[in-house]
Image (cartoon, grey):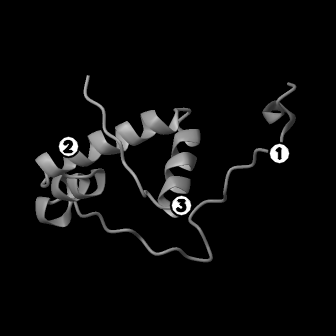
Amino acid sequence: MASVLIRDVGEALHARLKASAEAHRRSVENEAREWLRAAVVRQENPNRENLVTLARRLFGSENGADLAIPPRSENPERPPPDFSGSEYDRGA
């Protein structure tokens, strides 16, 4: 298996890498490996869609799925539900 040594990373980048590693419960080395893998995948497929662009492409106004959102008003058509009864208590 090949190895890579990266020098002079910089304190800010190292801090971000370390925080990301902690958030993903990985070692800093494993997190750096994952960042590198993800960067290579993005470079190999630069036109890959993210979730937002995919949703807009599939459900956007140009595809006939543009829904009119009614404006909010002070007087709703029906009263909001009342969940204050004892049957809604966790202990019930």
Q: Position of residue 40 (x, y in %)?
A: 21, 45
Return the residue nearer the eye: 44 or 5: 5
Q: Which secondary structure lies at badge 3?
A: helix
Give the residue at x 12% y 65%.
62
Q: Earlier in the sequence, mark 3 or mark 1?
A: 3
Q: Position of residue 16 (x, y in %)?
A: 52, 55
Return the mark for residue 41.
Answer: 2
Q: Earlier in the sequence, mark 2 or mark 3?
A: 3
Q: CA distance from mark 3 to mark 1?
A: 53 Å
| Above or below 68: residue 5 | above
- To which residue does mark 1 refer? 84
Which is in the foreground here, disc 1 or disc 2? 2
Return the mark for residue 3.
Answer: none
| Above or below 73: residue 84 | above
Q: Residues within 10 Å of mark 3 (few under 14, many from 20)?
A: few
Q: Position of residue 92 (x, y in %)?
A: 85, 24
Amino acid type of the residue tagged 1 in the rendering: Ser
Which is in the foreground here, disc 3 or disc 1? 3
Give the residue at x 66% y 59%.
79
Return the residue nearer the eye: 36 or 3: 3
Q: Residues within 10 Å of mark 2 (few under 14, many from 20)?
A: few
